[in-house]
Image (tube, rainbow, N blue to C red):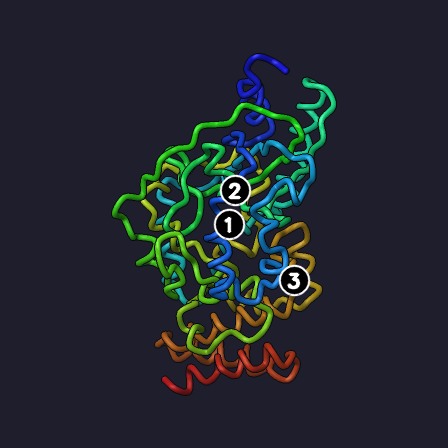
Amino acid sequence: MPADPMAQLQRWAHEFGFSQIGVADIDLSTAEGGLRDWLQAGFHGEMAYMARHGMTRARPAQLVPGTVSVVCVAMNYLPQSAPSDWPEVEISRAQQPEQAVVSVYARGRDYHKVLRSRLEQLAQRMKQAWGPLGHRVFTDSAPVLEVELATRAGLGWRGKHTLLLNRTQGSMFFLGEIFLDRVLPRSVRVSDHCGMCNACMTACPTGAIVAPQRLDARRCISYLTIEHEGPIEVALRPLIGNRIYGCDDCQLVCPWNKYAQTSALADFAPRAGLQGDALLALWAWDEAEFLRRTEGSAIRRIGHQRWQRNLAVAMGNALRVTRDASRVQVLRQALSVALPTLSPLVREHAQWALDQAAAD
């Protein structure tokens, strides 16, 4: 082991496209109470796996026996093509009801694939330089308290929206971990810099941030459009607007994201159809087209049925606010023609969408 392993880790991290790296201890016992309270409140919704794994999430050595250190990394995902005023550009998308909005992180290649591959390369580099060591890599793929570990690794602090924030990079990055059976020097935690700002809490369309650092996933648009499999609660549908996969509102208004950095990788460049396309164009995708367009994308995991459900909600919201009679007719026609072919779940949402125009 070299005298300064962190200097080596920093060099390797940048070589593999990571923007930050640090080392955390595995004692997360002080986080267990908050996790337990959050689960008992039912804020995890239908994500049964959250409750099923229980406190394992806060006990790295229980998840991977022998773990004594966790190397935490961040990888920026803001596309290289993002303009300097990207938050304003993204906010304007949500104000164009017939335009589909996909969360920025999901417009390119599946981040699980990108990070997992590069984390493994980083682990192999450690082995080459330091000798044999046991490891496992994770990125949003196991019961791991990622943000808690990242705060302890000095990568940032937990914002009021529950995401990790960094003074020089905002929050537009993914997190990943390498569980190690080797003791490494611990990184220094950074202090909280949210202060009195509540911009993210105020901006949340559905009021899902019920208190600082406390999110009710059942109201979160990202949960509703990605994790939730069944019908979306009728009262929440108008609040979703034209967001068909995820939601970035809490990040778009965060003052720290004026410092967000673009990715060092081309993997997160937006794919055709996933940035600025019309709802009608995406509604026209059959399942084969959906699978073709989303191959290698995180979006594919929700399947064509949920994709259509989300589009139907967005089209209903467009119908409710559109004053152009010709546009109303086009939207209604697209929904009506498809109605007999839709699954019961999607049909109910499509009928709701049609009713929005009738009720206006």
> Which residue is identified by label 2?
28
In terms of secondary structure, where does tag 2 sit?
Answer: loop
> Image point 63% across, 55% down: which residue?
53
Image quadrant for the N terminus?
top right
Mark 1: amino acid:
Glu
> Which residue lies at the image location 64% right of the left edge and 79% below the top edge?
342
> SS class of the residue under badge 1?
helix
Q: Which residue is mark 1?
A: 32
Q: Which residue is mark 3?
A: 290
Location of residue 104 in the rendering, given as x and y in whole percent from the top left corner: 49, 50
Tag of residue 240? none
Q: Is residue 7 visible?
A: yes
Mark 3: few/some/many CA within 10 Å (<14, 14-19, 20+): some
Q: Is residue 308 above or below residue 163?
A: below
Badge 2 density bin: few <14, some 14–19, many ≥20, Cα 10 Å: some
Image location (x, y in percent) of residue 302? 62, 62
User: CB of mark 1 within 8 Å of CB of mark 2?
Assistant: yes
Residue 118 in view = no
137 with respect to 198 (left or right): right
Quadrant position of residue 156: top left
Q: On screen, 217 above or below 131? A: below
Precedes in sequence: disc 1 or disc 3: 1
Relative side of 212 to 49, left or right? left
Tag nearer the camera, 1 or 3: 1
Amino acid beneath label 3: Phe
Secondary structure type for disc 3: helix
Determine contact: label 2, label 3, CB under 8 Å.
no
Using the image as rendered, state which of residue 293 and residue 228 is in the foreground: 228
Q: Residues within 10 Å of mark 1 (few under 14, many from 20)?
A: some
In the image, taking residue 163 as reference, residue 333 lies left or right, namely right
